[in-house]
Image (spheres, rainbow, N blue to C red):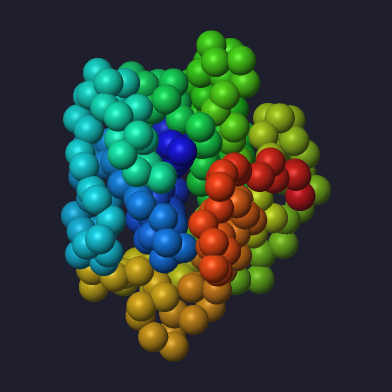
Amino acid sequence: MIIVVANSKGGVGKSTLAVHLAAWLHKQGHRVTLADCDTQQSSSEWVREAVPEVRAVRLDSPDMILNDLPQLCQETDFVVADGPGSQTETSRALLLRADLAIVPCKASMLEVRALAKATDVLRQAQDIRAGKPEAVIVLSMIGKNYRLTKDMKDAAAALDLPLATRALVLRQVYADAPGQGSVVWNLGSRAQEAAGEVDLLFREILPGAVRNRGRKPSSIKSKKVAVA
């Protein structure tokens, strides 16, 4: 399965989501490759330190993405691709190969409304591929006491994109993790809440990836998340 973390806006937590998703899938017992498709190439460096068992590759061009992602998918259970923070042909190529797109978004009306433009490339890919990839919006960097407003729900619904009920809170530990070459569940008691919310988010989005003790799942499917 190819999962792309995509948003044409920078600073919305794409690398945090991508690295933690790759690490979480590995923790569930799956073979995982992280494909770093961002020019900053920070997620591949981060995951090599945090979870060296996760294979990390850099795909520097749309042609490499279109040619190499299917092969990587044959060699592993999950490919998690960290997309660029811009509207580029790289984003288009990723979405033309993805099975699932996770779209992180900060929690404000301005950010959600901006998604209408940011998801243009996603819409094009879905038109070309008869509805694929599936996609879900994930709110990131929200305030601890944040409450989703009706306006926010309506804005997400207008995009015809599901909104995950779980979100990632703005926490210092997420900013600290890459500098320490780690993921939040390995940072001790101060990261306990972050570790819990990451686990619940990924269980919601990918229930079929949760490890079943005693047997290996015969198939893995993403869950269509209902709009909150």
Q: Determine which quarter of the picture holds residue 114.
A: top right
Work out which residue is located at the far right of the displayed protein and give it: 150
Q: Is residue 87 visible?
A: no
Residue at point 43% right, 85% down? 190
68 sits left or right of 152 in the view: left
Residue at point 55% right, 15% down? 129
- Reply above or below: 107 against 143: above
35 sits left or right of 135 in the view: left
- Reply above or below: 40 against 70: below
Residue nearest the observer in this picture, 2 or 14: 2
Work out which residue is located at the far front of the displayed protein and give it: 214
Number of numbered tags placed on the structure image: 0
Residue at point 61% right, 15% down? 130
Task: List x then y, in percent, for residue 145.
Answer: 66, 71
Task: List x then y, in percent, for residue 148.
Answer: 72, 56
Task: List x then y, in percent, for residue 13.
Answer: 42, 52
Residue at point 44% right, 21% down? 96
Work out which residue is located at the far bottom of the displayed protein and give it: 189
Residue nearest the observer in this picture, 85 or 42: 42
Residue nearest the observer in this picture, 31 or 194: 31
Task: List x then y, in percent, for residue 78.
Answer: 41, 45
67 sits left or right of 149 in the view: left
